[in-house]
Image (tube, grey):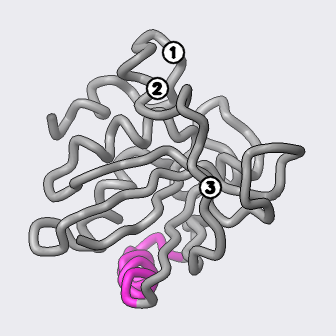
């Protein structure tokens, strides 16, 4: 199994979507690349993300990028839906350089590559989100989500 971290705005909808994808074994709501190693204190530069454990024999990073691009606006900087701010930026993070190269290649191969603002960076820090954010839309299905329900359930 391999792990990649996907950021697509508010993590509630992204987690609900990603966990339904073929080859995804486990997901966890979290924070990527902030400066703190805990959730206490002021905003520290993190991006809301979904830690995604996947079976590379079933789903590739290229596949995961395609899925991610189904639920994000890749041209929107620090904003998805009504959620605005640095923590809602889109991105792909990993400790494996092959994952980052595959993500960069996916973007490069698109005819709109020059307009895409999805961050592709090494994972330098990860903090698990509080329990109230784990599988949030399962617990509170009426909470706001920028991803339409039909799209969240597309691969169920």
* Residue drawn where x is 22% and y is 72% of the image: 60
Inspect the magenta stretch and tell me whether residue 5 lies in it.
no
Q: Dividing the picture into quarters, in which one does residue 71 lie? A: top left
The residue under label 3 is 127
Q: Judge from the rendering whether residue 27 lies leftward or rightward of residue 85; answer left or right.
A: left
Tag 2 near tag 1, CB within 8 Å:
yes
The residue under label 1 is 143
The x, y position of residue 133, in whole percent, is 54, 31
The x, y position of residue 24, in whole percent, is 22, 55
Q: Which mark is residue 136?
A: 2
Q: Dividing the picture into quarters, in which one does residue 142 lie? A: top left
Say which element carries label 1: loop
Magenta segment, which residues? Answer: 98-113
The x, y position of residue 36, in whole percent, is 79, 60
The x, y position of residue 77, in whole percent, is 68, 55
* Residue drawn where x is 22% and y is 41% of the image: 20
Distance from the alpha carbon under mark 2 to that under mark 3:
17 Å
Badge 2 or badge 1: first in the primary sequence: 2
Distance from the alpha carbon under mark 3 to that under mark 1:
23 Å
Most distant residue in the top direction? 142
């Amino acid at each position: 199994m391999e792990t990649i971290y996907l950021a697509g705005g508010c993590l509630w909808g992204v987690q609900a979507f990603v966990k339904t994808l073929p080859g995804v074994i486990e997901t966890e709501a979290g924070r990527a690349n902030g400066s703190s190693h805990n959730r206490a204190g002021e905003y520290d530069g993190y991006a809301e993300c979904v830690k995604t454990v996947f079976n590379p024999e079933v789903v590739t990073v290229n596949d995961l990028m395609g899925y991610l691009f189904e639920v994000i606006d890749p041209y929107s900087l620090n904003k998805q839906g009504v959620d605005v701010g640095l923590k809602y930026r889109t991105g792909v993070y990993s400790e494996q350089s092959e994952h980052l190269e595959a993500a960069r290649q996916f973007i490069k191969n698109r005819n709109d590559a020059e307009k895409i603002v999805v961050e592709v960076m090494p994972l330098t820090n990860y903090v698990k989100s509080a329990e109230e954010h784990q599988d949030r839309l399962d617990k509170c299905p009426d909470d706001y989500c920028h991803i339409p329900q039909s799209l969240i359930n597309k691969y169920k």
